[in-house]
Image: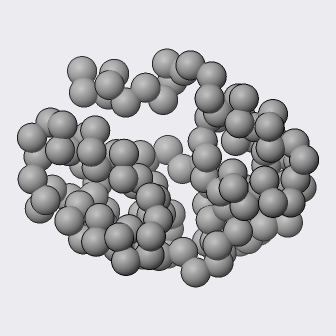
Amino acid sequence: MTRDAKLTSPDDTIRHAAQMMKDCDCGVLPVADGDHLVGMITDRDIAVRCIADGKGPDTKVREAMTQEVMYCFEDEDTHHICQNMADIQVRRLPVVNRDKRLVGIVSLSDLARKEANTAKALRGIARPSEQHNQSRLAA
């Protein structure tokens, strides 16, 4: 897992979030309001929910972020995390301690280095889904 995850705020602009992604060479940022994790924003969220809809760089992160936060615990079994990623079709999850404080982000590639079951997670992530289809969100 990456322990030094950068955070953005719902009131930051997508330009600021994109610059943070560029600086840390990542495609996802947790969104925090104070010490509460309130969402996630990806480079794809910015492209699909903002740029494709004609929104400018001063658009607030809250307009592009995914509000439903899926996460795993730092002491959780990696096999369970792989299964969870497959079930919810995500490649990265915030990692929290048992007090639900962010301690990092785990990616499928992080797990691939440690866990033999990542192929199962990848099959689940790659299957077609309607639940997380962003083109439906614009309606």
Q: Is residue 22 above or below residue 48?
A: below
- Closer to the camera, 5 or 26? 26
Residue 100 makes an appearance in the image: no
Task: Tell me where residue 24 appears, x and y as whole percent.
Answer: 44, 75
Whether residue 49 sits left or right of residue 121 in the image: it is left
- Closer to the camera, 34 or 134? 134
Q: Residue at x 65, y 78 (%)?
A: 3
Q: Residue at x 28, y 49 (%)?
A: 46
Q: Is residue 12 above or below residue 80?
A: below
Whether residue 129 sits left or right of residue 10 in the image: it is right
Task: Tell me where residue 19 appears, x and y as whole percent.
Answer: 28, 71
> Image quarter for residue 34?
bottom left
Whether residue 66 sits left or right of residue 100 in the image: it is left
Q: How is the image coloured?
A: one colour
Please identify the quadrant where the C terminus is shown.
Answer: top left
Q: Is residue 4 above or below residue 56?
A: below
Q: What is the tally of numbered marks visible in this picture?
A: 0
Whether residue 6 sits left or right of residue 13 in the image: it is right
> Image quarter for residue 5?
bottom right
Residue 114 makes an appearance in the image: yes
> Image quarter for residue 21?
bottom left
Please identify the quadrant where the N terminus is shown.
Answer: bottom right
Task: Tell me where residue 85 appears, x and y as whole percent.
Answer: 70, 41
Task: Tell me where residue 43 appears, x and y as whole percent.
Answer: 36, 53
Q: Is residue 111 above or below residue 119?
A: below
Q: Residue at x 54, y 21 (%)?
A: 129
